[in-house]
Image (cartoon, rainbow, N blue to C red):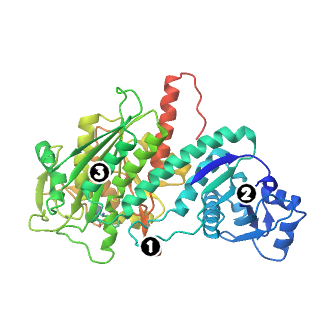
Amino acid sequence: MEFTVKSGSPAKQRTACVVVGVFEPRRLSGPAAELDQASGGFLTALLRRGDLEGKKGQTLLVYGVPNTLCDRVLLVGCGRERDFDERAFREAVATAARTLDEKGAMEAVCFLTELPLKGRDTAWKVQQAVQAVEHALYRFDRLKSEPERPRRPLRRLVLAVPSRRELAAGEEAVRVGRAVAEGVRLTRDLGNLPANVCTPSHLAEEAHALRERHPERVQVEVLDREDMERLGMGALLAVARGTSEPPRLIVVEYRGAEAERRPIALVGKGVTFDSGGISIKPAQAMDEMKFDMCGAASVLGTLEACAQLALPLNVVGVIPATENLPSGTATKPGDIVRSLSGRTIEILNTDAEGRLILCDAITYAERRFQPEAVVDIATLTGACVIALGRHAHGLLSNHPPLANELLAAGRMSGDRAWELPLWEEYDEQLKSNFADMANIGGREAGAITAACFLARFARKLRWAHLDIAGTAWLTGERKGATGRPVPLLAQFLIERARRAADDVRPGARREKA
Ligand code: BES
Ligand code: MN
Ligand code: ZN
């Protein structure tokens, strides 16, 4: 999709379609009122006849609006004006995009970005609009014989900004929105691919493809089973024992700043299929365990966004990737292994495999890169889905400032996280009679005890953990990867880059988030 920004009056747009908002009950938004005035009350008359109440999700495509230069006008219901919030804004934009795509308008000028939104400026609205449109029009049909595409898809969208002074900021917002959307798309594609295609080696190839797209700033290194053995990654290897699909530890380095600058490490769980291993899962919805590599996918997606934006930061992605299957060589409940850190782990449940591959990846990241901060991203626990549902990522951290940065990035991007406590009382649930720790902490507070396990490997680090088990994919009719938490992570890094720039310009003032 091509996006541009423009300022001007809706009546004067020479285009296939002008998009304006209508609030409930039948109240024209500013740009809609302008059109109405130019057309001699044409829209008011339509609304009076009861064609559109203005409820969320409603649309009305109108032809022949007098004294306009456009072929048609799309009215989009935005709900009550005083309830018009960030979510309503994104939904209105998504509804507009889907309608335009279906109706064959192919290009349009959208004035929804001029609707006032408390606390959000034009740049925010433009960036969010770009992401919402790309999100709404995303399809995963590469494995269908007959792609499901509209005959005349939406190709070009012009986003209106209220004044010429805002054009430059609007253009920059388009650039950022596109980069984040591309990262989200990559993450969704990888998540949606089935496990027989998206294997650990496939993830490694995707990392190489990322380097090919950005050879000047991205480097990739891939460790195989022998490398892991040599290094002593007993926890990661314990998970990989059950499958003949070769495991990989994928290291992607993005260099946007001087080499001396310590990187931010993103560690992503890459279990390309989680059957549970010997502690096997029930058959019900087991297909969804192909999404158990969405943490890994979000690391690649975030690095793609980073590279497209050429952020002045160093970021390193570390992705432990393996299948978790039962077999004659698989790890058994009660087996004890030695992690890369040297500590021993009693594997009481082979389905708690995410933390096993992550603990070695975190230790590896620490030793190799001395990162400034580590954020791990994992579809780690069903318990997190019970605690927070499908709306917020679970966030646990040993460093409050880092937690706050991530929470703020979530609010800014609309890709929100919610913090859970990481207290010693919970950590005590991990004790083992036979090893330094067990890999499970009982039924209670499962999302927290999983994070406590990881925290034991991050004591010397500024570390945060995002449990995305509830948010990385949707179930039911809309089953599919969401691309989350790429928007949150991209926003976090954008903000970090801004801060780094301020550091080298003493006296520079930062805007309030
Ligand atoms: N990948 C799963 C977590 C998961 C389950 C994500 C369902 C989304 C939906 C993870 O590897 C797992 O199996 N966790 C176990 C941990 C338990 C054995 C302590 C769980 O949540 O049941
Ligand atoms: Mn599991
Ligand atoms: Zn898993």
Residue located at (73% from left, 38% from top):
165
Indicate the secondary structure of the residue bearing disc 3: helix
Q: Amino acid at mark 1?
A: Glu
Q: Amino acid at mark 3?
A: Glu
The image position of residue 258, as x and y in percent, is 39, 26
Residue wearing tag 2: 15
Task: Work out whether mark 1 precedes mark 3 in sequence or the reverse, and give the earlier one.
Answer: 1
> How far is the residue under mark 1 from the one under mark 3?
27 Å
Numbered tag placed on residue 205 in the rendering: 3
Q: Kindly indicate the quadrant of the structure image that contains residue 276.
A: bottom left
Indicate the secondary structure of the residue bearing disc 1: loop
Quadrant, the C terminus: top right
Is residue 461 among what the camera can see? yes
The image position of residue 76, as x and y in percent, is 70, 65
Residue wearing tag 1: 146
**Residue occupying the far left of the picture:** 328
Indicate the secondary structure of the residue bearing disc 2: loop
The image position of residue 74, as x and y in percent, is 72, 65
Q: For the residues carrying marks 2 and 3, which lies nearer the camera in this image?
A: 2
